[in-house]
Structure formats: structure tokens, C-alpha cells
Amino acid sequence: MSRKSWHSQQQGHIRLEGKRPSDGPPRKISPAPKAALEEGILQLLASAAEMQQHQDLDSALQLYQAAMEKVRENGLNRKRLFTGTNKKPPPLSSRTPLEWCLHVGDIASAICLPGSPNAALTELRTTVSLERVEQVLDAGADVEHRIGPYGRTLLLQEAAEGRHASVRLALDRGASVHCMDDNGDTALALSLSYQKPQADLIVADLLEAGADLNTRNG
């Protein structure tokens, strides 16, 4: 029997293993479970922190950006992944991603994680050194951005906390002494009300910058 005649007789009777009929339903690809997605993101964050420890900041930034993109794409809880050290893989078991960024001075990644310079300033607030706050301002954060409770700016927040150096920084960056928080309090009013140890220095600087005792609050 010729090869041609054998093929004609057997056509339709031989089926290759693993070949799906063309008219069959397409296979559905199930999305990755949430736990698996979060584990993958934590590994990206851990790898980024390791890169930072070796001063490979460009690679760290790329990994942080990839992690942030996955969080956005899948609608995951950013706070759960980026805060706290409990049950996190090393080196995240000792510092959070943001803490690693600040520890090594990686301001680009510190801004990438919250999403913008203003968001970074809000998240960092007064939990870091003055040098780091300066770097975030240098990166484009608005000194008048509301970062604290009651809609307080950096100047208002630092005046309330009695941090003279931070108040000087805010004033040097052009913060308005006439700005008020949601309660109608100015930096001068907050400094006089809370009477922190450096209040006298802060009040003197605010008055020199143009604060008015007659309009110390709303």
C-alpha cells in the first residue's frame, strides 16, 4: 500500500496525544492567589533592600518600582506589605522598605514607595532626620503640603512639636507664617499653646519672619 493511499484510509482515525480539537473550549487561566502575589511582592521588596545594602541603588529602585506596579495592578493592601517587620523575609524582618531607604540614604526609592515627594513628606513627617526631610524637599515636595493632623503643614507641625531646627528649615524654604491648620491655629499660636522647651526660640523666629501676635489664631 502506498503512503498516499494509507493516509487517505486512516484520515480521521488517528489522534495525536495532547492535541485539543479546534472546536473545543479554550482553557481558562486562573489568576494567582492573593497570598502568592503578596509573597512575590515581599520577595521583590526584600531583594531591593539587599541591593541597597550593597549600594546598588539603581537596581533597588527598579525592584521597588516593579513591586509598586504589582500592588497597583492587583489592588493589594499597600500598608500591609510595606509596613511592619513581623513575619517578613530578611532583611525586611529588621527594617521596613522605607526604613531601609532612609538608612542607606536612597531618597529616590523613598519617594517611589509612597508615590510622590509630597506623599513621602506626609509619610516621613518628623520620624526621620532633618537631613532626610531636606532631601525630600529638594526632590520637589511642597513645604506647604498638609502632612500632619488637623491639616498641618511642616511649619505648623514642627511648631506644635517644638522642634526649632525644623521650624527654621520650613521658614528657610518659604513656609508662610500666616498659614493656619483646620482649627484656625497659626504656627505662633501652636508654639505658644504647647510651650515646648524650644518654644521661645521658635516664637522669636516666627515673629522675625512676620508673624503677628494680634492674629495668632483664627
Image (cartoon, rainbow, N blue to C red):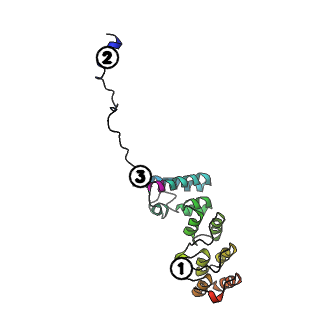
Point 40% across, 54% down: residue: 34
- Indicate whether 210 appears above or below 148: below
Q: Are marks 1 and 2 in contact (CB under 8 Å)?
A: no
Q: Is residue 40 visible?
A: yes
For the C terminus, the image quarter is bottom right
Residue nearest the observer in this picture, 129 or 4 = 4
Q: CA distance from mark 1 to mark 3?
A: 43 Å
> On residue 36, which mark appears?
3
71 within the magenta span: yes
Residue type (three-letter) at the residue carrying disc 1: Asp
Q: Residue lying farthest right? A: 208
The percent coordinates of residue 108 (x first, y second) are 61, 59
Of mark 3 and mark 2, the one earlier in the sequence is: 2
Point 34% across, 10% down: residue: 2
Residue nearest the observer in this picture, 159 or 178 = 178
Q: CA distance from mark 1 to mark 2?
A: 87 Å
Residue type (three-letter) at the residue carrying disc 2: Ser
The percent coordinates of residue 194 (x first, y second) are 57, 85
The percent coordinates of residue 116 (x first, y second) are 57, 62
Disc 1: which residue: 182
Disc 2: which residue: 8
Q: Is residue 56 visible?
A: no
Q: Start and end of the magenta stretch?
A: 70-74
Of mark 1 and mark 3, the one earlier in the sequence is: 3
Q: CA distance from mark 3 to mark 2?
A: 51 Å
Q: Are marks 1 and 3 in contact (CB under 8 Å)?
A: no
Residue nearest the observer in this picture, 179 or 60 = 179
Residue type (three-letter) at the residue carrying disc 3: Ala
Label 3: state its secondary structure.
helix
Of mark 1 and mark 2, the one earlier in the sequence is: 2
Residues packed near mark 1 inside 10 Å, few (<14), some (14 to 19) or many (20 plus): few
